[in-house]
Image (cartoon, helix red, strand yellow):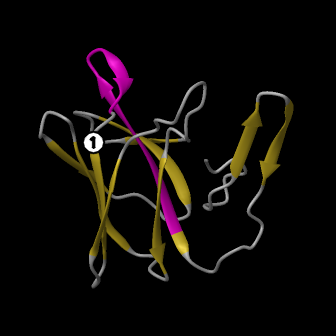
Amino acid sequence: TGDLDDDGDLDVVLFNNSAPARLLINQIGSANHWVGVKPVLTDPPRSAHGSRIGVLRAGESELWRRYDSGGSYAAASDPRALIGTGGSDNLEEVVVVWPSGARSSWRLPVDRKAVVFAGHAAARAD
């Protein structure tokens, strides 16, 4: 699974041993907002599997996801965590709790994806 067309919803690719691959693109559309986050550790550079990503929405509750792109044999999911924010287009902050327990936060725009780095105040568009 993953957001193959970068529109904020999950799409699916199915692989079979003896049949062609199948691509299922989610084209329903949505009026809701989302943010995509890929946390990266910096020393040495690697994915931050096991991190927790939280989205704090203005005047609403927090949303949390565990970062893991694992899958099964010869397969994996999108390396970015997609978090739906509903109708809220005003995020107070995006928080990452790294595997070490350290905590970092950024102000990220909605309906976009970003790469965030441990120990850095800036994020990079993905």
Give the vertical position of 21 relative to 57 (above or below): above
Name the residue located 53 percent from the left edge and 72 percent from the top edge. Answer: 33
Provide the major secondary structure of the magenta segment: strand
Q: Residue furthest front?
A: 18
Residue at 62 percent of width and 62 percent of height: 9
| 41 within the magenta span | yes
Neighbor class of circle 1 (other Cα within 10 Å; few <14, some 14-19, many 20+) is many
Pick the residue in front: 53 or 113.
53
Tell whether 54 sits left or right of 14. left
The residue segment tinted magenta is 34-48
Left or right of residue 14: residue 69: left
Position of residue 72 measured from the top left corner of the image (x, y, whole percent): 53, 33
Q: Amino acid at mark 1?
A: Ser
Is the residue 112 above or below the residue 114 in the image?
below
Magenta residue check for 123 = no
Q: Residue at x 49, y 44 (%)?
A: 80
Left or right side of 99 for 20: right
Taking the image as shown, residue 27 lies to the left or right of residue 65, namely: right
Q: Position of residue 108 (x, y in %)?
A: 40, 57
Residue at the far top: name it: 44
Q: Position of residue 100 (x, y in %)?
A: 14, 33
Which residue is disc 1 drawn over?
51
Residue 30 location, quadrant: bottom right
